[in-house]
Amino acid sequence: MIYLLELIGVAFFAVSGVAASRAKRPDVVGAFILAFATALGGGVIRDAILGVPARSFRDANYLVAIVLGGLVALRLPGVIQRLGSTLPVADAFGLGLFNASGMVKALESGTVDPVFAVVLGAITGTGGGIFRDVLCGEMPALLRPGELYVTTCLAGGVVGLAAFWLGASLSAVMGITAAVTIVFRLAAIRYEWRLPAVQWDGGGGD
Amino acid sequence: MIYLLELIGVAFFAVSGVAASRAKRPDVVGAFILAFATALGGGVIRDAILGVPARSFRDANYLVAIVLGGLVALRLPGVIQRLGSTLPVADAFGLGLFNASGMVKALESGTVDPVFAVVLGAITGTGGGIFRDVLCGEMPALLRPGELYVTTCLAGGVVGLAAFWLGASLSAVMGITAAVTIVFRLAAIRYEWRLPAVQWDGGGGD
Amino acid sequence: MIYLLELIGVAFFAVSGVAASRAKRPDVVGAFILAFATALGGGVIRDAILGVPARSFRDANYLVAIVLGGLVALRLPGVIQRLGSTLPVADAFGLGLFNASGMVKALESGTVDPVFAVVLGAITGTGGGIFRDVLCGEMPALLRPGELYVTTCLAGGVVGLAAFWLGASLSAVMGITAAVTIVFRLAAIRYEWRLPAVQWDGGGGD
């Protein structure tokens, strides 16, 4: 079940990689490179930080999911346009799942402090998008004000960490983290949550 | 023999790193940083994905090859200009060798699905160039339409994988992958092969 | 003692990450992402190359140091401005310490040639700044002529390597490397040292 959700998340992130590449007008291989980097980038960075071989490379189904997601995005842009408002929902599910699985893998590893497990979840959830933007030669979207992408991951991770410290099992931690992340993300979109702006002009000094 | 070819590939990629940096007019250390990143970037990413220490860092000869390649590019630009049309040939050999060695190391590792070994070969062959372009603040060349760089690696890798599944030894797989990659790359240059353009304007939906 | 210095170096690099982000006007989470990437990026790359789990993720104190550094930079910009001329001194200490610790960890690992240990020290010292600049969508500062950042690391590393070959203990190597790096960096700033420019217009060919 979790495995199936993860493959769906991978396919969705592949769609997002192809969609983001439109402005650059790459050829078909270029579009698939971006699909690949977006879908697997976060997990690859996570595993490199954990010092273990990249898990996604063990399993050809990940590649199948990426190719399917990429093909849909390339051949059926009409479908994606019609999906329209359901896309952010799918994105929120992908983000929540990646965040939760990254955090739990860090907690399992024994080489990461639990507080850093929250960070590693956020890296797993957002690393692919960073890769995608860097490969496109753009400033990563998540550094732009108003995107609550990383904040969402941290919110889910902090609640999951609290559950972990209260003695919840790792699968409960995973479920809680994923659920909070998804709900937070959808609420952030629905109610247009914003982080406080930073007063960069100096001043401050309180 | 393979080892010697690999060092030559490293030196060549160092030349390409320095050549690519010209427009940025770095100082001499900046030029060598780019030479270094271009020559070793692909292999370092490959080993990080495999979860093993970077092999190139074990062997000071790689550094010697990079320094020699960088010095030639810096001190003898005339030589490189005169080499002119032979440069793409050297580049094709470097690409083929990196692609083949990346794929075989992935097949040997036991932690990578054979289908992903093809991907890892392409990452080994092209990762250094991606590093180089990102460090220069440019969109990686291989995302621009018309470059059959990644396609070349995949073509060589798929033929090598077929040989692997038919029972060929790893050294045979390496030779076949390298040969197909090199021939494909030279043919792509000679006959100006292009990938089909993607119809980004929408339409599609077939 | 070394541990405490390392935490101070981390906090300082966090300040530098936030300060560098000003032009991009990120929100508060964006600023902390840059603080995090600047402070830990070099060490994470080093450990990925060594094939070991990222050491900084084991220890929540690193996160505390980053948060403290980031908060100071965000809330007390006046303090940082008043520190003014002492900032480059703090930066030189951070650089020297990161360079020395990266080099010694490489020498200890047994998987890196001593010559490459010098390179790995420089990567540890400068990798965070590269991460910061790439995430900001800018060409890394250390490729711009006139910055003796990498050169400083290499100078300290070469002297440390000479000490290592003469039989010095690892802690002596660490002290020597850090001291030479710090002194070299401060001298480079004080006397405005410059590397020889490269004659990119051709010419050369001697």
Image (cartoon, coloured by chain):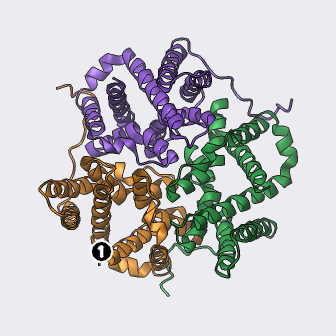
Chain colours: A purple, B orange, C green
Whether residue B122 is visible to the viewer of this picture, yes or no, is: yes
Comparing B93 with A2, the one in front is A2
- Crowding at label 1, few (<14), some or many (≥20) Cα neighbours within 10 Å? few
Residue A116, percent across and down? 60, 37
Residue A63, percent across and down? 28, 39
Q: Residue at the spot x=57%, y=73% of the render? A: C114
Q: Is residue C190 left or right of residue C162?
A: right
Query: Could you tell me how many numbered marks the image carries?
Result: 1
Residue farthest to the top?
A191
**Chain on which label 1 sits:** B
Residue C80, quarter of picture: top right
- Disc 1 element: helix
What residue is shown with label 1?
A: B2
Type of amino acid at the residue the image marks with label 1: Ile
Q: Residue at the spot x=32%, y=60% of the render? A: B105
Q: Residue at the spot x=62%, y=59% of the render? A: C142
